[in-house]
Image (cartoon, rainbow, N blue to C red):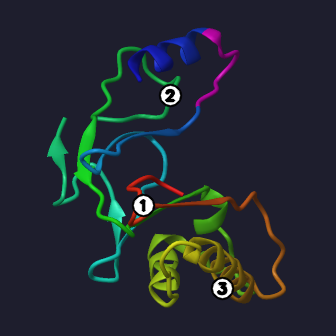
């Protein structure tokens, strides 16, 4: 990440930066190692309990293995955090267009609104992420109402397959 930051800073023209999340998954152990460079926190659905939680460097599930957006400050240190993903667990990555979408009254969805929205939806086993994503898109449309979409809204769902241990 430090090398990526330095390359971005060196090659970017003007004041430019980018956020990034880098994930590595080890099938044999179920360990996910991640580094966040200024990106929004991922959401993590725990299949065993049905709970949604934020996946951040400070998670109580972390194992030790700092993070500004890429291109801002040379020499930035990025933390690498490891957690165990159980079969059926799902991760949700999203762009800021999701949390910054506004309804007709100008109210922003925000992080807590997104968390409340996903907690109100059901995510099932394999194949569930597709239906969940569609339901989430519908929930965002209902929240927005007739207000215009102001930014890109991208959602990526990764679910650990219970039988093969890999992500789908």
Which is the main secondary structure of the residues drawn in magenta?
A: loop
- Residue at figure coordinates x 30%, y 25% from the top left: 77
Q: Answer few, some or many: residues within 10 Å of disc 2's Cα (few below 14, many 20 plus, some between 14 and 19).
A: many
Which residues are drawn in magenta?
11-17
Mark closer to the chain start, 3 or 2: 2
Q: In the image, is residue 89 part of the stretch drawn in magenta?
A: no
Q: Position of residue 41 (x, y in %)?
A: 42, 56
Tell me how far mark 3 sits from mark 2, CA to CA.
32 Å
Q: Position of residue 131 (x, y in %)?
A: 64, 80
Tell me how far mark 1 sits from mark 2, CA to CA.
28 Å
Q: Is residue 110 left or right of residue 49?
A: right
- Residue at figure coordinates x 22%, y 58% from the top left: 59
In the picture as drawn, the residue positioned furthest to the top comes out as: 10
Q: Position of residue 69 (x, y in %)?
A: 48, 34
Name the one closer to the observer, 27 or 133: 27
Q: Is residue 115 left or right of residue 87?
A: right
Determine whether 85 is above or below 115 in the image: above
Q: Answer few, some or many: residues within 10 Å of disc 1's Cα (few below 14, many 20 plus, some between 14 and 19).
A: many
Q: Which residue is mark 2?
A: 70
Q: Are marks 3 and 2 in contact (CB under 8 Å)?
A: no
For discs 3 and 1, the disc positioned in front in the rendered view = 1
Q: Which residue is mark 1?
A: 160
Label 1, secondary structure: give it: loop
Q: Which residue is mark 3?
A: 139
Tell me how far mark 3 sits from mark 1, CA to CA.
24 Å
Determine whether 120 is above or below 96 in the image: below
């Amino acid at each position: 990440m430090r090398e990526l930051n330095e390359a971005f800073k060196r090659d970017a023209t003007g004041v430019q930066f980018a956020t990034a999340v880098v994930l590595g998954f080890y099938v044999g152990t179920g360990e996910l190692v991640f580094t966040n460079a200024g990106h929004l926190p991922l959401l993590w659905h725990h299949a065993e309990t049905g709970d949604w939680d934020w996946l951040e460097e400070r998670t109580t599930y972390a194992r030790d293995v700092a993070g500004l957006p890429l291109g801002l400050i040379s020499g930035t240190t990025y933390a690498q955090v490891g957690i165990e993903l159980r079969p059926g667990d799902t991760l949700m990555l999203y762009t800021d267009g999701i949390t910054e979408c506004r309804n007709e009254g100008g109210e922003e969805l925000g992080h807590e609104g997104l968390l409340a929205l996903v907690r109100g939806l059901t995510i099932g086993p394999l194949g569930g992420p597709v239906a969940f994503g569609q339901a989430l898109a519908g929930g965002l449309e209902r929240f927005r109402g007739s207000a215009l979409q102001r930014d890109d809204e991208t959602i990526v769902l990764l679910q650990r397959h219970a039988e093969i241990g890999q992500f789908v």
